[in-house]
Image: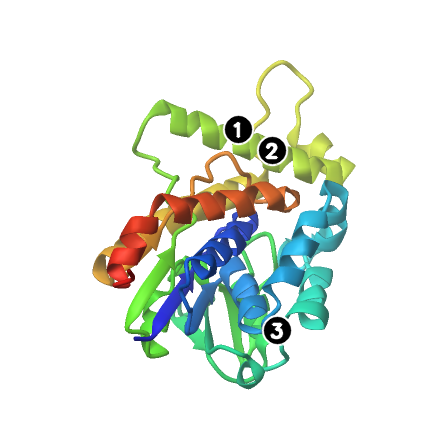
Amino acid sequence: MKVGLALGSGAARGWAHIGIIRALEEMGIHIDVVAGCSIGSYVGAAYASGNLEPLAEWAKSLTEWQVIRLMGIGLNKGGFAHGQKVFEMLAENFSAPTFEELQKPLAITTTDMYSGKEVNFKTGEILPAVRASCAIPGLFPPHRLNDRWLVDGAVVNPVPVNLCRALGADVIIAVNLSADFRPDLAERTVQEHEHNQEKTDHFLAKSHAFLREKFGNGSREPAPPSIISVMSNSLEILQARVTRSRLAGDPPDVIIEPQLRDFGIMEFYRAEELIEEGRQSVERLAAQIKYQLMMD
């Protein structure tokens, strides 16, 4: 029986994938194939290369200011950040150069910016595919690959269950990082997302003084959301709805949904907490996972 793991999108919340993978392996589950979207492709590339632990140690060492420097926030064509150093870290320390050199088969999903089609990668160089899959609209610029402008795979396929099937998986474990986003539910959910929006705006304001001047009004009235918050929250709404639709049409055997509503999309410096929540999300489902995988 071949087990597939579909790692969903979610920006900083993706560090929860590390805790999930650790917990699954500690249960004795052998993951045979991996599919990733956005941050899921980043973590998936490190895992399939046998470098999950070095990635975890690096992620836990990050401070807020280190994240700001790594992101390369500024006036970049097509996005507010270029993220060059983030992807250099992956290429130099955590990932094999090509899909063919990985220890486990990996597939990565992206979106064609003009046609809206899902574009997937299973062969060739890994880094360009990860860069394209992580190109959150507005934050990172689109990445040109094979004569196409590609953006975040979350636009069309946030949790790539179908790619696990394409890699031959018999049983699929999917990780949905956007399960907490329910725009149609209680007022508490709205308040929590407003709080996360404020944290995102604060992060950006620390990156560039002009962002504070532009988006803050200096009065007692609440400042309007920044451009990045508008785009990220809109994408989060889209992603949550697309995820529910895709998972309903192509359900995995097990779905893991960490409780991440308290984590902002730019809080990469909270890796230790995110990894722990990932672990706990597996522990809450341990009995179901064992049942689905027919484990004793």
* Residue at position x 71%, y 63% in the image: 84
Q: Position of residue 205 (x, y in %)?
A: 70, 36
Q: What colour scheme governs how the chains and residues are painted in the rendered image of this protein?
A: rainbow
The quarter of the displayed image where residue 170 is located? bottom left
Amino acid type, residue under disc 1 in the picture: His
Cα separation, mark 3 vs mark 2, equals: 29 Å
Mark 1 touching mark 2, by CB under 8 A?
A: yes
Which one is earlier in the sequence, the residue at label 3 or at label 1?
3
Q: Secondary structure at mark 2?
A: helix
Cα separation, mark 3 vs mark 1, equals: 33 Å
Q: Secondary structure at mark 1?
A: helix
Quadrant occupied by the N terminus: bottom left
Amino acid type, residue under disc 2 in the picture: Lys
Which of the numbered marks, if any, corresponds to residue 127? 3
Q: Is residue 112 visible in this depiction of the protein? A: no
Q: Secondary structure at mark 3?
A: helix
* Residue at position x 61%, y 46% in the image: 271
Q: Which residue is mark 1?
A: 195
Which is nearer the eye, 131 or 167? Answer: 167
Q: Which residue is mark 2?
A: 199
Q: Position of residue 176 (x, y in %)?
A: 39, 52
Which of the numbered marks, if any, corresponds to residue 81? none
Mark 3 touching mark 2, by CB under 8 A?
A: no
Q: Position of residue 216 (x, y in %)?
A: 66, 27
* Residue at position x 73%, y 61% in the image: 85
Q: Is residue 44 visible in this depiction of the protein? A: yes
